Amino acid sequence: MTTTLLDVVGAQYSFWDYPIAFLPFIPRAFPFDFSMVPVAYMLLYQYFRTWKSFILAQIIMALTYAFIGEPFCKWIKLVNYLEWRYRFSFIYYIIVGIVTRALILKLASLSKPQNLTTK
């Protein structure tokens, strides 16, 4: 949901646009916002349990998406970047990954039963 919200805001403020609509009644980046990006985050969260390994994997994913995936999408004309730079995407992917993992870990710790001792 975060990716979709920020994608709509970025398009609204003309940071980028999508020349091709897969379906006219859904957001134009729907396939990316609801599949490729969240699945990558889920896999990182599942397979990289420590913060150190997670951040390293997150950096590799962000580099791949921002400096390989996005230029490829621009090259095949799926997206047109107007006021956006790939380095902004790199930072975005890192921040979203770290904030999401921190939130998930916090929610998981709150849902665990507390060890109550009686006196």
Image: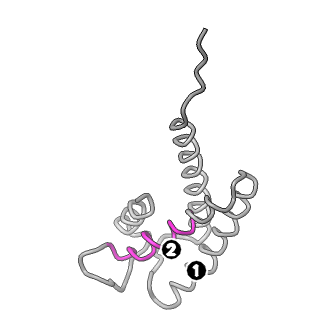
Q: Which residue is located at x 65 percent, y 69 percent? A: 61
From the image, tell me which residue sits under label 1. 69
Q: Tag 2: Cα neighbours inside 10 Å, few (<14), some, or many (≥20)? A: few
Q: Residues within 10 Å of mark 1 (few under 14, many from 20)?
A: few
Judged from the image, the secondary structure of the residue bearing numbered disc 2 is: helix
Image coordinates for residue 76, horizontal then vertical, percent: 49, 91
Secondary element under disc 1, as helix, strand or loop, is: helix
Q: Is residue 23 left or right of residue 75?
A: left
In depth, the one of 115 and 1 nearer the eye is: 115
Q: Are marks 1 and 2 in contact (CB under 8 Å)?
A: yes
Q: Is residue 66 above or below residue 92?
A: below
Q: Which residues are magenta?
A: 27-41
13, 4: nearer the viewer:
4
Q: Relative to 44, is 29 above or below?
A: below
| First in residue order: circle 1 vs circle 2 | 2
Determine whether 11 is above or below 20 in the image. above
Q: Quadrant of the N terminus?
A: bottom left
Vertical position of residue 22 compared to residue 64: above or below = below
User: Residue 80, located in which quarter of the rendered image?
Assistant: bottom left
Residue at the (46%, 72%) spot, across then down: 35
| Residue type, numbered disc 2 | Met
Position of the C terminus by quadrant: top right
Q: How many marks can you see? A: 2
Residue located beneath label 2 in the image: 36
Q: Is residue 70 magenta?
A: no
Q: Which mark is residue 6?
A: none
